[in-house]
Structure formats: structure tokens, C-alpha cells
Image: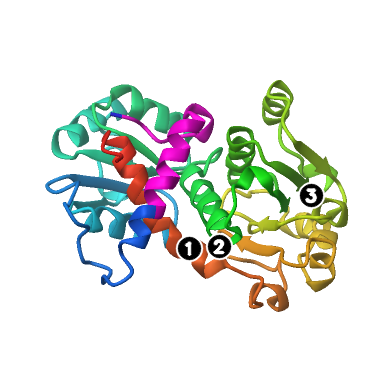
């Protein structure tokens, strides 16, 4: 049994095994419908219980399809229906009940501490569907998409992140360290990665550079990745923040500083951090990026159950 919470806690070998398996599984589904089951139904009889404390579209649908295609089933819980959210039951007791009924638990949460408590008290795999400090399933899928399009290992590419320092960037930093690829981070000075992440970068002596100018960050990039500047976690002055990011808007002019065949990715939903001229262009691979969540999360589930081929 394996948990999937943060990329930094999973070996590079296991992450690569997940990507290899996802590639094989995607190729075998070319002529299948969304609800057709994979050959061998490797997770037949397994139940994935999932709970969303935060809004979700892609994570919710992709995990539903992932477990279905593997032959299992899913049950989605609403946190406001549980005793847990009303203060009547502890995480320890909730975790033990979920472990008794389900075979894996996927949580999209506002608390990293809550994830750790579920891991502590659960006897089934815990999967992080998003937390304040990590979006591991998203970034591993992004690595898959990049390699699928570029047809080469991400370790031979330069990735540029243009945007806020958030949970998605944290996982991208971890991916850069695990897969050893160059990562340029472009953000205003006030929005750099926090001290803990900077210490993590320094300790691993990785190929990560931070720029306070978007053009320098985008220079020579094979891939430009962004996220919504005003995220679900933002509680500060949003207008002030948008002003700070005014020079970090992704437009055709900025894309010219990257390589000619540079692609654009965005984990969605989008805001005004990217122009339609880029988002709807042939360089944008956001829809391919979104559907690949299904294929990679299938292999993540198999990893958690110890069933990777």
C-alpha cells in the first residue's frame, strides 16, 4: 500500500513507473468509450471514496473515470453531510470508518494537516486531490503531457512557470528536483516561493532559477505553465495582487521569448493571467492536459494499490 500526497515523498523511480504505465494504458484505450473497462479490470471490486472540501471539476471527473476504467467504483462524500465537519466526530474515527468501507480515500482539502492525520489513522491509501501546499496529481499529469507532446524526457527540456507561488508551483518544484529538469520561475518579488520551498530548492542544488521579470523567465523555454493568479486560497487584497502581476500576463509578445515550438499549459480554471490569443492558439495544449489527468490518475491508483505492471 502506498500513499500519494506529495511528489517530494515519492521516489523518482516510482514516479517514472507511473508515467510509463499511464502511457501504455492510454495507448490501449484508443478505441474504447469512457466507461469501457480496461482489460483485466485490475481494480475490480475496489471502492474509491472521495471527498471535496474545495470546488472541483477536473479532479472530480478524472478520478471518477479513472477508477471506473480500472473496474472499480467511486463514492463521493459531501463534507457538510459528515459528522466530521460539524465537530461531532474526530478525524481518527472518521478515518477508521472510511478505511472499513472503502479501499482508498482521495481528499481535496483546505488543510495539509488534515491529510497527514488521515494518513496517520487510515489503513488504506490516501491520495491528495489538492491541498494548500501540494497538487501532486496535477503536476505528474503535466509531466506526462509535456513528454507526450515533446516526445522526449522532461529532463532535456526547460520549463517556465509564470505566475503566483502556490500549491501547483510547489509540486512543479518537486517534479523539477525528481526528474532533474530546468525550471525558471517568473513572479513579482513579493510572490516568490516561501522560505521553506527556497530551502528545499537550495538543499537539492537543482536547476531552478527565480526571476522577477517574465521575459527572462520565459527566455528559451520549451514549455510555459501558469495558473490562476487569484486562487481559491487568496484572502488578501485581490486588486492589489492583480496590479503586481500586470507585467506577468502571458500574451503573444511574451511567448516570442520562448522557443518557437514552445507549448502553453494551464491547470485551469483560468483568469485574466493569459490572453485568449495564447490560450486558444495552437501552442495551447490545455485540453489535452486536462484529459490526461484520467490516464495518469489510473496509474497513480494502481501505484497506491501496489498493482503497477
Q: Is residue 48 magenta?
A: no
Q: Which mark is residue 186?
A: 3
Percent x, y of residue 105: 29, 40
Q: Identify which residue is drawn at 67% across, 64% down.
A: 263
- Quarter of the image that includes the C terminus: top left
Q: Is residue 140 left or right of residue 261?
A: left
Q: Is residue 247 visible?
A: yes
Q: Which residue is at 26% across, 70% downward?
A: 32
* Mark nearer the N terminus (1 vs 3): 3
Q: Camera-side residue: 229 or 161?
A: 161
Q: Tell me: residue 84, above or below residue 31.
A: above
Q: Residues within 10 Å of mark 3 (few under 14, many from 20)?
A: many
Q: In the image, which residues are magenta? A: 2-23
Q: Which residue is mark 2?
A: 268
Measured Cα–Cα span from mark 3 to mark 2: 18 Å
For residue 63, above or below residue 111: below
Amino acid at each position: 500500500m502506498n500513499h500519494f500526497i506529495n511528489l517530494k515523498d515519492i521516489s523518482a523511480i516510482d514516479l517514472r513507473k507511473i508515467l510509463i504505465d499511464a502511457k501504455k494504458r492510454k495507448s490501449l484505450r484508443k478505441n474504447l468509450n469512457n466507461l469501457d473497462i480496461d482489460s483485466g479490470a485490475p481494480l475490480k471490486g475496489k471502492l474509491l471514496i472521495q471527498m471535496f472540501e474545495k470546488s472541483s471539476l477536473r479532479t472530480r471527473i478524472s478520478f471518477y473515470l479513472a477508477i471506473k476504467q480500472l473496474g472499480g467504483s467511486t463514492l463521493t462524500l459531501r463534507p457538510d453531510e459528515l459528522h466530521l465537519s460539524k465537530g461531532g466526530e474526530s478525524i481518527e474515527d472518521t478515518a477508521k470508518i472510511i478505511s472499513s468501507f472503502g479501499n482508498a480515500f482521495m481528499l481535496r482539502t483546505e488543510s495539509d494537516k488534515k491529510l497527514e492525520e488521515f494518513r496517520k489513522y487510515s489503513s488504506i491509501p490516501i491520495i491528495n486531490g489538492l491541498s494548500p501546499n501540494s497538487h501532486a496529481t496535477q503536476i505528474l499529469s503535466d509531466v506526462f503531457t509535456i513528454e507526450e507532446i515533446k516526445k522526449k524526457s522532461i529532463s532535456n527540456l526547460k520549463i517556465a512557470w509564470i505566475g503566483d507561488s502556490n500549491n501547483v508551483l510547489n509540486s512543479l518544484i518537486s517534479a523539477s528536483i525528481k526528474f532533474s529538469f530546468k525550471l525558471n520561475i517568473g513572479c513579482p518579488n513579493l510572490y516568490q516561493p516561501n522560505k521553506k520551498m527556497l530551502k528545499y530548492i537550495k538543499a537539492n542544488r537543482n536547476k531552478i532559477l527565480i526571476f522577477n521579470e517574465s521575459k527572462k523567465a520565459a527566455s528559451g523555454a520549451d514549455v510555459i505553465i501558469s495558473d490562476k493568479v487569484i486562487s481559491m486560497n487568496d484572502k488578501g487584497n485581490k486588486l492589489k495582487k492583480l496590479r503586481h502581476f500586470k507585467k506577468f500576463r502571458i500574451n503573444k509578445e511574451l511567448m516570442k521569448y520562448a522557443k518557437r515550438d514552445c507549448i502553453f499549459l494551464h491547470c485551469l480554471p483560468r483568469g485574466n493571467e493569459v490572453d485568449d490569443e495564447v490560450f486558444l492558439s495552437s501552442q495551447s495544449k490545455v485540453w489535452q492536459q486536462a484529459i490526461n489527468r484520467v490516464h495518469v490518475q489510473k496509474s497513480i491508483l494502481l501505484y497506491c494499490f501496489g498493482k503497477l505492471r
